[in-house]
Image (spheres, rainbow, N blue to C red):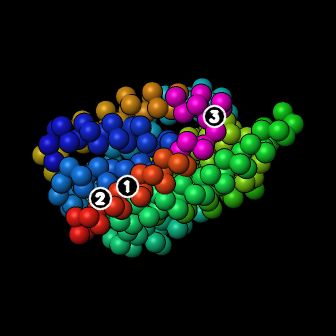
Amino acid sequence: MTGLQAVILGIVEGITEFLPVSSTGHMILAGSLMKIQDNEFVKTFEIAIQLGAIAAVMLLYVRRFLREPRLYLILAIAFVPTGIAGLLFYKYIKALLFNPVSVSVALIAGGVILLFFDRLAARNEHKPAGHETEVSPKNAFIIGLFQTISMIPGVSRAAATIGGGLAVGLNRVRAVEFSFLLAVPTMVVATGYDLYKNRASLNSAHLDVLAIGGIVAFATALIAVRFFVGFISKRGFFAFGIYRIAAGIGFLVYFWGRGF
């Protein structure tokens, strides 16, 4: 992997990590389009640079992490389902579904579901202003169950957790912000575990591209997070659903045309 390819993947990660379009899926597709060799290090790179994007959220929401002790309990409860499912199934999913065709199909299916979530979000916006201003432990666990679906590349962790938030009655902004916050423990644990499991495939030659990808992901995520909150508060998720469907169909046509 070259430095330029690491920059491009860092931009893709930073932009897509917190949008409901699947960052892992987009990096798999981007890597395939750039003809990056598919090996264990590349798969680990695609996960490791998520730490850069997560650092951006920690910076933007540092006051909430410092001022709301209850938040740690709620996030821990929400993380439990994903932690259990990850230990049981992630290695099989990584081996079988980390490929462009699976991602393209998941993008299409997720896009259709996101259109449904957009209508659900519109109904939640008309609920009383004080409705579900805080996420209860029960609702945190339900959102965590939704998050487990995102282990399938192309589904999108953000889409799954936002959908879970909307399903338990949160409005768009609250659902999106909780998705951002839940990303911190989820991706830190997932990335740390993946790096540990694949430490034998890493060496000093990889540090440069990992650093480049992580820094670029951090910078672009800072911009993407601010954009996303403002955009969905006014326009909802419809555009992202349409984008997912169009992108998934486009990639399927491209890869099948190549005889993938």
> Left or right of 116: which side holds 168?
right
Q: Which residue is mark 2?
A: 254
Find residue 235 and name its label: 3
Residue 66 placed where, x, y %?
60, 29
Q: Which residue is mark 1?
A: 250
Q: Dividing the picture into quarters, in which one does residue 250 lie?
A: bottom left
Type of amino acid at the residue the image marks with label 1: Gly
Q: Nearer the viewer, residue 176 or 102?
A: 102
Label pair 2/3, CB-CB below 8 angstroms: no
Residue 48 placed where, x, y %?
33, 48
Magenta span includes 18: no
Taking the image as drawn, is residue 3 in sight? Answer: yes
> Left or right of 226: which side holds 199?
left
Image: magenta residue range: 227-240
Label 2, secondary structure: give it.
helix
Residue at 24 percent across and 52 percent down: it is: 33
Residue at 29 percent across and 66 percent down: it is: 256
Callout 2 crowding tier (Cα within 10 Å): few <14, some 14–19, many ≥20 = some
Mark 2 vs mark 3: in front: 2
Type of amino acid at the residue the image marks with label 3: Arg
Look at the magenta stretch and give its main secondary structure: helix
Label pair 1/2, CB-CB below 8 angstroms: yes
The answer to which of marks 1 and 3 sits earlier in the sequence is: 3
Q: Nearer the viewer, residue 56 or 237?
A: 237
Mark 1 vs mark 3: in front: 1
Residue 37 placed where, x, y %?
17, 58
